[in-house]
Amino acid sequence: MGMGDALADVMLEGRARDAESSARLAQAEASRLQSKIHNLELVQIAAAAVSERLQWKYIGQGEGFKALMLGFKKTADKMLSEEQKKEFFKDAIIFARQFIKEESGEIKNLQESTISAWTDENFGWSAVYPLFEISPPCSEPTAPIRPGNIDRRVKRLFFFIPYRLYFVGEQKFHKLRNAKRLFDSLIEVYEKEMVAHLSFHARWVKYKEKYEKQQARIAEYALPRPV
């Protein structure tokens, strides 16, 4: 074997060792990353379980509160006269207000969070048991006005040559296709505004009904004006 062949064998052997070492390192890194991914998945599963338990806790608290309040109401309906029921609910709401305002102790955010919940437009209990008075609704929203149709007018040049013009509102066009392009754009905007209006109007009607119901309950229970 010549010197060149021996040198080549040494180089090949070195490269093989380097390749084997790189393969081991790559395998070790892959194992480490897989273990890290597995640990992250376990953390996510644990966090999801905690979140679910908390969610069920809050749902259960809300359902239990609602059931208890309905139980009180049905008991009052069964045992008290109409006048006694009014007095009962009046006193209950007044005591609840006093607790929220004066007896919250260390729960410093109780009043703020309670006001936020009980004046929310989607929270129906605030109409039946008016701990806080919701604001009067704004004036009824008006629907957007549909753009008028394209107005075709005939003018006369030099008092005898007929010439047709197209108007979209006050905008004047000499060609119908240009007038139609603007008209179609205005209709598209109008339709989008109408969708938004109908959605807002439905919310307005719902809020107005809630406000009127709350005002009727305040008068029925002869409550002092809520805070």
Image (cartoon, rainbow, N blue to C red):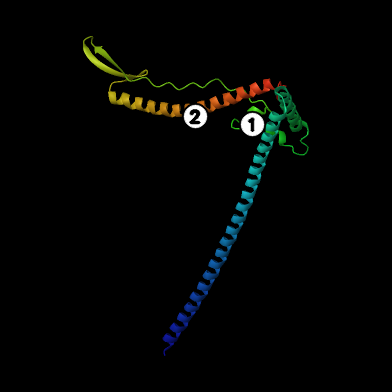
Task: Name the residue: 68% across, 21% down.
Answer: 220
Residue 83 locus on image (x, y percent) = 72, 22
Q: Amino acid at mark 2?
A: Ser
Q: How many marks?
A: 2
Q: Which residue is mark 2?
A: 199
Residue 10 locus on image (x, y percent) = 47, 83
Farthest top residue?
Answer: 159
Q: Nearer the viewer, residue 8 or 90?
A: 90
Farthest front residue?
Answer: 78
Is any part of residue 131 visible from this angle?
no
Task: Name the residue: 52% across, 75% down.
Answer: 21
Q: Nearer the viewer, residue 92 or 7?
A: 92
Q: Determine the CA span between mark 2 and mark 1.
A: 23 Å
Q: Secondary structure at mark 2?
A: helix
Q: Amino acid at mark 1?
A: Trp
* Quadrant in which residue 193 is drawn: top left
- Which mark is drawn over residue 125? 1
Number of the front mark, 2 or 1:
1
* Quadrant in which residue 170 is drawn: top left
Q: Secondary structure at mark 1?
A: helix
Say if 161 sits above or below 59 in the image.
Answer: above
Q: Nearer the viewer, residue 195 or 54?
A: 54
Q: Is residue 191 left or right of residue 137?
A: left
* Quadrant in which residue 111 is drawn: top right
Residue 115 locus on image (x, y percent) = 67, 31
